[in-house]
Image (tube, rainbow, N blue to C red):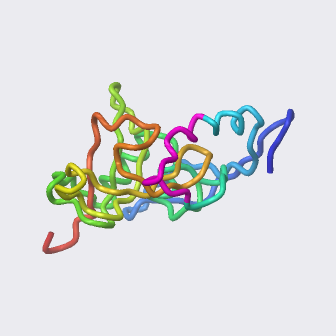
Amino acid sequence: MILIGGQLTQKTIDLATARGSKIENAQITELDISEVNQFVHYKKYETESTHLRTHATPRYNCHGMTFASRRTGIYGTQDLKQILTEDDYIEIKLEDVLPGDVIIYVSPDGDYEHSGIVVSAPHDGFLGIPRVVSKWGKYAEFSHWANNCPYTFANVKYFRIKIDGN
């Protein structure tokens, strides 16, 4: 639904870490026309190697896709850090990245500005860059090379849930 004027509605769901800590979240149900107008910004990243996966939806953001199964949006870096800690994620090196791992794009000020899920490991044929699926703001999900998206690739981190034996 696109909203022209008026108030956007949102709700929350019960969302917690594996250790039971509450995670702030919001399911936004409508798009403001100004947000829809910003979608054109994302179009320049759509290339033959960037594939649109879904229609635009404001219900979840990239972090909600990555850490909440596309059920809601997660907006705070502190919440993301809490998820990483309490769900037992460990940071891994680029050369150890495998499909299913998480990529987080870190802004110069330390904010976790974007996240996604790795779908193919980095290899020499693609300059050591993994392919990921991520949600671009309130727009849509894309399958793309990690360095071909609207977010800064200069400082990324990779994570995997620690399982006994890792």
> Vertical placement of 78 versus 71: above or below?
above
Q: Quadrant of the C terminus?
A: bottom left
Q: Position of residue 163 (x, y in %)?
A: 22, 71
Which of 55 and 2 lies nearest the eye of the viewer? 55
Q: Is residue 96 left or right of residue 34?
A: left
Q: Is residue 62 left or right of residue 105?
A: right
Q: Which residue is pictured at 26% across the width and 45% down the height?
A: 157
Whether the magenta-drawn stretch holds residue 30 is answered as: no
Which of 81 and 109 lies nearest the eye of the viewer? 109
Give the magenta-colored segment's residue range: 41-52
> Vertical placement of 162 versus 126: above or below?
below
Q: Is residue 28 left or right of residue 78?
A: right
Q: Is residue 42 left or right of residue 8?
A: left
Which of 66 and 123 lies nearest the eye of the viewer? 123
Q: Position of residue 134 (x, y in %)?
A: 46, 53
Q: Position of residue 15 (x, y in %)?
A: 53, 59
